[in-house]
Image (cartoon, rainbow, N blue to C red):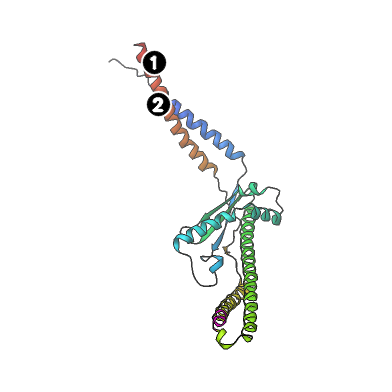
Amino acid sequence: MRSHTVNRTVPAEALIVLGCVIALSLITFIVSSLSAPVYQSEAFIHISTMSPGIAFTGTALSDSVNAEWRETQMRLIRQRPLAQAAITRLGLETSPDGLLGHVDVSADGQQNVVGVTATDKDPKRAAAIANTLAQAYVDWSRDVRERAIKESVAAIEAGLKEQTSRRLALNRKMKSLGPADQAESQEELASVIGLQTAFQSKLELLKVNERLVVSVGRIVAPAVPNTKPTSSILRNTLLAALVGFCAGLVLAYFIQRRTSSANHDRL
């Protein structure tokens, strides 16, 4: 009985794929092992659905305008002055751009809740950065509303003073006129009184707003230290193996095509 010896060799393409998988997995494992773990913490801010100008009139923004309003507030949270305020409060040794490079601001679905996520090698510091930046935005938005109301109060008071002066002047003028000549002045006086009443009503509303002024946003859930790192050595290694497998397949495919083309040319 004749025996047959079968020589089985591993295809070169398989060796290429295996080599890519091992190389990328090993490199990722070493880098992940040597890298310091990083942590994330997130603070949540509720953004008011009313703009500063109508916050106390009870008129809410429409859905489309409200979405734009929320996006604007998200961009404002990432402004450099607020980042600098957070740096000063925490005593960090970094720049506003450096801090914002480790901060992400995102919306929670269609709700008016915005998440401020900070990433740092220290879980407590990550939570402190998220909370401090969120509070800096709340304080800043309250200051903006206070300044806007004070400016409006000053403008209304100036208008009211002007109309009061006009009314007094018209009263003096009418006293010097006869009954037949007072008709035109009476119409002008009625107009002045109407303006004076409107200014007075606006001023009273603004005075109430000034006492009850609130921020555009309020923190509804402060960040807490998260002791679980955002990156996992096992997860990173598995992802690297998958990438290596795909890269190996692509490399093996091109090598095979080149080899087949070279053999074809020789024939």
Q: Which residue is mark 1?
A: 262
Q: Is residue 106 above or below residue 54?
A: above
Residue sitting at the far bottom: 179
Q: Main secondary structure of the magenta part?
A: helix
Q: x, y percentage for residue 21?
A: 48, 32
> Residue 101: x and y, percent?
60, 47
- Which residue is at the front of the view, 54 or 189? 189
Where does label 2 land, which residue? Answer: 253
* Residue 218 place in picture, x, y as percent: 58, 65
Secondary structure of residue under mark 2: helix
Work out whether residue 141 or residue 195 is closer to the camera in this orientation and state it.
195
Instruction: Residue at the far top: name it.
Output: 267
- In this rendering, would 116 be left or right of 266? right
**Which quarter of the rendering shows the C terminus?**
top left
Q: Which residues are magenta?
A: 183-188
Residue 9 in view (yes/no): no
Place of residue 98 in the rendered image (x, y in percent of width and height, measured from the top left) = 64, 46
Q: Residues within 10 Å of mark 2 (few under 14, many from 20)?
A: some
10 is higher (above) or lower (below) than 126: above
